[in-house]
Amino acid sequence: MSDIILDVSGLDKKYKDVHALGGISFQVRQGQIFGILGPNGSGKTTTLAILLGILKANKGTFSWFGNGQEASNRIRIGALLETPNFYPYLNAIDNLRIVAKIKNLPNPKAAIESVLQRVGLAERANSKFRSYSLGMKQRLAIASALLSDPEVLVLDEPTNGLDPMGIVDIRRLILNLKEEGKTIVIASHILDEMEKICTDVIIMRKGTIIREGKLAEITQDKEHILIHSSELQKVKEALGSSISRIISEQDSWMEFTSDLSSLEINKKLAQLHIYCDEIFVKKQSLEQSFINHIEA
């Protein structure tokens, strides 16, 4: 049995003069936290809206669970798309009762109690939605998506507008859901936060995918090497064209990428009797990887 949860091929979408998606393709596998990343306007929400059946693509195909676009897929997918929308004068339980009725759930009371516990809202279950913080509203939206105990969660900017504690709450919740065996597709422009939770990502820009792969591979495309030396000019001359790009330089410090490994650099400088006070490798952040690809 295939572990491919979602197979996307050549999705293309135009809005009059705007080419929102330019033939993107990717796969999501079971158990991944799959990030669709990029700045606002890159096509993330359009992609999710097509995958959830809200918009139609002009070209291309996608298939959930190897079952195409069948309506039966919907019960297996829970979604939070853009801003959470509930009745402000109702409490969490009553809002979720309405959702459960729409989803035609057979035992809504037990399901509602379960999801409120899972998202940490059991103690505020009887509070009106309008009294909730932004983080609590996001958690209720995720509770709504979890009501039918779906195999897959599709989340659009789940930490958007939250304070630091709210972001931590949502991050913990997403990681806990992965531990429960859920597959999670998450779109966001907050690269630093996605680096903490995603296993695999695509990076989008202007409707196209500019990078995709395992998060660990993307953040280690090239080592960032930091050298501290009182003879920095001699270091630069000795390394010459093996320096691919100088990221920053100040006083006796230089951060750069190179065709050589840090070990090879250290050996080469020692052979020339040029010694460094410090030399070490700095892990490249997802944000820096994104900037590098944008500027390439």
Image (cartoon, rainbow, N blue to C red):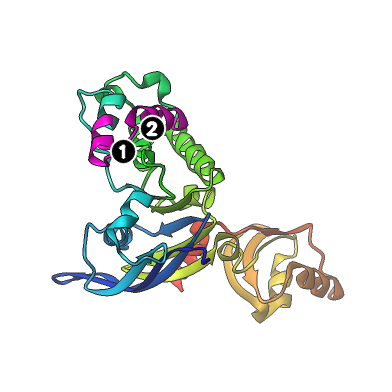
Left of 139 or right of it: where is 84?
Answer: left
Which disc, if any, is residue 105? 1
Can the viewer see residue 280 in this picture? yes
Disc marking residue 111: 2
Q: Residue at x 83, y 75 (%)?
A: 272
Check the image and report above or below for 94 versus 216: above
Residue 62 x/y as whole percent = 34, 68
**Which residue, as the protein is rendered here, is positioned at the far bottom?**
241
Residue contact at pointers 2 and 1, CB within 8 angstroms: yes
Range covered by the magenta-colored residues: 97-119
Q: Is residue 109 magenta?
A: yes
96 vs 156, nearest the viewer: 96
- Residue 200 placement (x, y as % from top left): 52, 60
**Location of residue 7 (image quadrant):** bottom left
Q: Earlier in the sequence, mark 2 or mark 1?
A: 1
Q: Is residue 77 visible?
A: no
Q: Give SS at disc 2.
A: helix
Asked if residue 185 is among those painted magenta in the image, a careful observer would answer no
Q: Total number of numbered labels? A: 2
Q: Which of the 4 quarters of the picture holds residue 59?
A: bottom left
Residue at (76% x, 71% y) in the render: 265
* Secondary structure under the numbered disc 1 in the rendered image: loop
> Label 2: few (<14), some or many (≥20) within 10 Å?
many
Q: Residue at x 53, y 54 (%)?
A: 31
161, above or below 87, in the image: below
The dominant secondary structure in magenta is: helix
Residue visible at 29% across and 48% down in the picture: 81
